[in-house]
Image (spheres, rainbow, N blue to C red):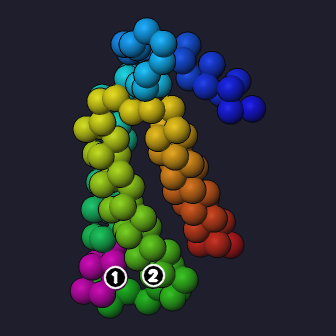
Amino acid sequence: MGGVIGNVLAKVMTVSVSRKPGGGPPPLLKNPSRASCLIAAFVQALVFLTAISANVLQSMLDWSCNPWTTCYFQLSAVICLLTTVFYVFLACVDYRSDERWYSYLGWMLLITLVKLGGKRRGAG
């Protein structure tokens, strides 16, 4: 399965191959989506500011909100802050091995699942 995913990634990403005859290190894959990562970081920063301002306005104006709503906004702010840092980090990455890209993909999947789980809990 890893070979199939690696072949797909090799077709999608630019491969920088500089091998010595008879072996050497594996090729590194170039990051083709630096601008997309910066856009995603900017959007996450806006959502972070929105969640923080909702918390501040709720406390300043003495709104009576459901405690779950307050908890949801606080959790959203924390997750968006972490996601913003992660996307800025990805935008700074030039070349990495396929194993490292797989680990980044796993972290992105985990972040997405946490966001979806929080949305389901907060919406109900």
Q: Return the x and y of residue 43 as percentages of the image width and height.
A: 34, 46
Magenta residues, as a range?
Answer: 54-60
Of residues 123 and 112, which is closer to you in this image? Answer: 112
- Occupied quadrant, residue 38: top left
Residue drawn 68% across and 32% down? 2
Q: Is residue 88 left or right of residue 72?
A: left
Kind of residue sitting beneath label 2? Thr
> In whole angstroms, how far apart are the C-alphas of marks 1 and 2?
8 Å
Q: Which residue is outermost to the top?
A: 21
Residue drawn 34% across and 41% down? 90
Vertical arrangement, residue 24 with respect to residue 65, above or below: above
Which residue is disc 1 drawn over?
58
* Res 111 visible: yes
Kind of residue sitting beneath label 1? Gln
Of residues 17 and 109, which is closer to you in this image? Answer: 17
Q: Return the x and y of residue 120 as percentages of the image width and height.
A: 66, 66
* Res 43 visible: no
- Occupied quadrant, residue 49: bottom left
- Occupied quadrant, residue 77: bottom left
Q: Which residue is outermost to the front?
A: 22
Which residue is disc 2 drawn over?
70
